[in-house]
Image (cartoon, helix red, strand yellow):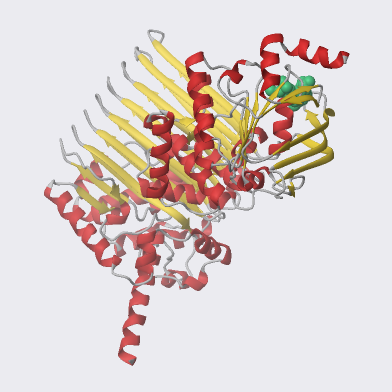
């Protein structure tokens, strides 16, 4: 059998805090296996380490793996640069995407697509793909001329992240609280597009803090994170229980077993 | 067989000749053999005689020389900047302008390397490969010339201008930059060579940018360029002094004087991108006057040079006049870009804006030095200054020296905003998470930073500028 798309074993990490100039332990032994064709939802209260996990996997300069293993497509990512990981097929839709003044979205997208494919993409080819993606996501062309994420509303930022996902075609797409800051209609639309993206050749890791995302996506796996560990995993039924009873109750039941 | 080969060789020789002509790799070797040194009235007389100039021009040169000899160095900059100028050698520069070329062999290796890495635009690549592109550019050239002549536009090198339109030049020369304005203006007035003379008749709108490239007797910017551009009533013109290839100069010294006159309702834009070799001290006095409802814009890009001192100015003389400066500077290792702008609001209902962007890198130093002056009686004035500095590392520098002198209270709005920033690791990480390599990510951020300048350029210049910035940044990632 093929190796899993993502395989984490006892993953521990620290983050460098610029305020205190210290390494703070965050992940404390994460085990997680994701195969192609799966949709994983990662839940947990604020501060439990969900974003940290995503950034550790993407290669954030302040996050460091200190112990355990992280393999993507069978290869350890420990020594890979963020751009190498991206070119290998990983993607993170940021919770807080960065703004870059004077960099038009269109220019950025073409550069990203070319980087991902490690080849120049003729303008006409790129434009065809771009037009199709814009149409599918219902994004207007004027968007392309704006500076990347500069002055974007919360919703525009999130849709821009999803647009990038559609163009870059990652095999593992991690979405960090893509739902937050969206109103119900936008949420519906964005997660409809996310679901459209999922297929048998890729996998999603959807990070969320609220359970409402579960109304729009059918996860194959649900995990609950607490204090740097995945403390509970299950199927869609777990999400239903959380939906009905809340985190505390579900975890509490577990803890009392 | 052999005759074919000869033909090819001939082509190559022709091409190289033009290459040098276009990019300014020439000095007059004959003069270099001359044993005379320094600038004396006799030498000025000799130059003027060789050029067959009218008496008034000789007088202008001689009186300028007198002023130059009696003037101290500028005091606003640390004087060590000027220590390296060897005035004794000035004679060589003053005599430049004859069409004789030095060998490519004489160009220092690092400049050659830069050329190789720079590459050249597609058209020029073809041209260099001997493909028929040279004929195309000839065609364009003639077409442009014809169109302009039909409209009564004068577009000449300054020497020819003096010969053909002496009266007009005499009326305007030194009006905005008097001989004694500063030491280097005086020197330029005494020794000028090269530059452009442009006159746009009333109501004529020149649709395509006028490029020095299309000028008769095209020459790259000389050591002592002298340029006058006049946009008569209701006329409109965009002039570009394109000089994006590194301009090698043996002389380590460039001082230009540019005077722009925008008459009532005229629109005049002057764009320059200078990329001198890093031994050059680049001192240019750029000044413009905008009459009633006229607009003057300076687009000023400064790369290269050891030290640049450049403060394009607009004198807003009559109501409705508008002035605008957008500038970028890139100070790399050992370089100092001291650039800025001056806006003089001498009339009510005038507006101005200055956007100055600087990038400092590898220990380079950028400064913004600006003046906003609002004269008494100049009410209803609006002026905006924005200077943004980007530091690419911890040991590069940037500073600002703004002077704001407002003598009128009535409805005067002065905005001044200055920022200093670094490229954050988080931003680079965001771009890298999309597969973009670190150096490319940094370049994207820098190009974004100067986009307000780049977007004002014709496409080919914008592309060229981005490429130059990429070259400057090469090896910037450890
Ligand atoms: N750069 C940082 N400096 C200091 N502490 C951090 C940093 N990033 C994350 N943390 C801490 O790590 C813990 C997990 O944060 P995070 O991964 O953002 O959680 P979540 O995404 O689940 O809300 C929190 O206690 C947070 O304060
Ligand atoms: Mg988070």
Instruction: From the viewer's perspective, tell me whether residue A32 is left or right of residue B409.
Output: right
Residue at the image point whose x is 83% and y is 17% from the top = A254
Instruction: From the viewer's perspective, tell me whether residue B199 is left or right of residue B466.
Output: left
View extreme (bottom): residue? B2
At which x and y percent is residue A222? 70, 25
View extreme (top): residue? B410
At which x and y percent is residue A111? 51, 45
Quadrant hosting ligand 1 = top right
Image-quadrant location for residue B16: bottom left
Instruction: From the viewer's perspective, tell me whether residue A193 is left or right of residue B204.
Output: right
Quadrant containing the N terminus of chain B is bottom left
Number of marks drawn: 0
View extreme (left): residue? B150
In the depicted structure, whether residue B464 falls above or below residue B427: below
At which x and y percent is residue A205? 65, 31
In the depicted structure, whether residue A105 falls above or below residue A47: below
In the depicted structure, whether residue B428 falls above or below residue B19: above
Residue at the image point whose x is 19% and y is 46% from the top = B167
At which x and y percent is residue B470? 54, 50
Residue B305 in sight: no
Image-quadrant location for residue A90: top right
Image-quadrant location for residue B215: bottom left
In the depicted structure, whether residue A73 falls above or below residue A218: below
Foreground pick, A94 / A100? A94
Instruction: From the viewer's perspective, tell me whether residue B217 is left or right of residue A206.
Output: left
Foreground pick, B414 / B227? B414
Foreground pick, B79 / B379? B379
Residue at the image point whose x is 44% and y is 52% from the top = B244
Residue A44 in sight: yes
Residue at the image point whose x is 34% and y is 67% from the top = B127
């Amino acid at each position: 059998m093929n190796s899993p798309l993502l395989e984490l074993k006892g993953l521990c990490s620290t983050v460098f805090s610029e305020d205190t100039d210290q390494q703070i332990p965050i992940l404390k032994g994460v085990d997680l296996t994701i195969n192609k064709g799966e949709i994983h939802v990662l839940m947990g209260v604020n501060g439990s380490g969900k974003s940290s996990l995503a950034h550790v996997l993407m290669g954030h300069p302040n996050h460091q793996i200190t112990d355990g293993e992280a393999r993507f497509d069978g290869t350890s990512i420990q020594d890979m640069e963020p751009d190498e990981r991206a070119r290998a097929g990983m993607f993170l839709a940021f919770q807080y995407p960065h703004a870059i003044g004077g960099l038009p979205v269109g220019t950025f997208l073409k550069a990203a697509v070319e980087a991902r494919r490690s080849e120049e993409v003729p303008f006409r080819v790129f434009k065809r793909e771009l037009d199709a993606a814009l149409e599918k996501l219902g994004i207007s062309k004027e968007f392309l001329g704006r500076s990347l994420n500069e002055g974007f509303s919360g919703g525009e930022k999130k849709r821009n992240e999803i647009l990038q996902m559609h163009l870059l075609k990652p095999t593992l797409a991690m979405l960090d609280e893509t739902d937050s800051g969206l109103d119900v209609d936008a949420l519906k639309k964005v997660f409809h597009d996310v679901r459209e993206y999922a297929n048998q050749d890729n996998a999603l890791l959807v990070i969320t803090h609220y359970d409402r995302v579960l109304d729009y996506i059918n996860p194959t796996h649900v995990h609950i994170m607490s204090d740097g560990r995945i403390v509970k995993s299950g199927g869609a039924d777990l999400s239903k229980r959380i939906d009905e009873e809340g985190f505390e109750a579900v975890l509490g039941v577990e803890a009392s077993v | 067989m052999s005759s074919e080969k000869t033909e090819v060789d001939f082509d190559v020789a022709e091409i190289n000749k033009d290459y040098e002509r276009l990019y300014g790799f020439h000095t007059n070797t004959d003069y270099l053999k001359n044993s005379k040194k320094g600038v004396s009235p006799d030498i000025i007389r000799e130059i003027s005689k060789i050029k067959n100039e009218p008496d008034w021009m000789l007088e202008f040169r001689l009186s300028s020389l007198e002023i130059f000899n009696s003037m101290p160095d500028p005091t606003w900059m640390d004087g060590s900047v000027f220590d390296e100028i060897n005035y004794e050698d000035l004679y060589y520069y003053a005599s430049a302008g004859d069409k004789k070329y030095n060998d490519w062999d004489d160009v220092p290796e690092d400049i050659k390397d830069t050329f190789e890495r720079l590459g050249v635009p597609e058209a020029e690549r073809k041209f260099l490969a001997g493909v028929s592109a040279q004929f195309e550019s000839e065609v364009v050239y003639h077409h442009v010339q014809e169109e302009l002549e039909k409209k009564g536009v004068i577009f000449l090198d300054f020497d020819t201008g003096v010969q053909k339109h002496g009266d007009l030049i005499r009326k305007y020369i030194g009006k905005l930059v008097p001989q004694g304005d500063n030491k280097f203006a005086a020197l330029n007035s005494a020794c000028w060579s090269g530059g452009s003379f442009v006159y746009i008749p009333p109501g004529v709108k020149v649709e395509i940018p006028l490029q020095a490239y299309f000028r008769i007797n095209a020459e790259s910017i000389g050591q002592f360029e002298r340029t006058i551009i006049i946009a008569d009533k209701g006329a409109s013109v965009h002039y570009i002094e394109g000089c994006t290839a590194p301009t090698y100069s043996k002389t380590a010294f460039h001082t230009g004087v540019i005077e722009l006159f925008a008459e009532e309702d005229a629109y005049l834009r002057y764009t320059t991108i200078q990329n001198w070799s890093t031994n050059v001290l680049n001192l240019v006095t750029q000044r413009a006057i905008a009459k009633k409802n006229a607009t003057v814009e300076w687009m000023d890009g400064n790369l290269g040079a050891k030290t640049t001192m450049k403060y394009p100015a607009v004198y807003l003389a009559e109501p409705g006049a508008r002035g605008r400066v957008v500038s970028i500077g890139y100070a790399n290792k050992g370089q100092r870009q001291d650039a800025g702008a001056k806006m003089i609001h001498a009339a009510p209902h005038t507006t101005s804006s200055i956007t100055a962007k600087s990038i400092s890198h590898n220990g380079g130093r950028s400064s913004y030095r600006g003046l906003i002056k609002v004269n008494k009686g100049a009410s209803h004035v609006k002026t905006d200054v924005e200077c943004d500095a980007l530091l690419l590392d911890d040991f590069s520098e940037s500073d600002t020296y703004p002077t704001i002198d407002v003598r009128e209270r009535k409805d005067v709005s002065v905005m001044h905003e200055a920022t200093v920033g670094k490229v954050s690791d988080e931003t680079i990480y965001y771009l890298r998470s999309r597969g973009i390599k670190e150096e490319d990510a940094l370049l994207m951020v820098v190009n974004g930073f100067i986009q307000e300048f780049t977007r004002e350029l014709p496409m080919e210049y914008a592309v060229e500028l981005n490429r130059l910035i990429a070259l400057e940044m090469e090896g910037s990632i450890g």
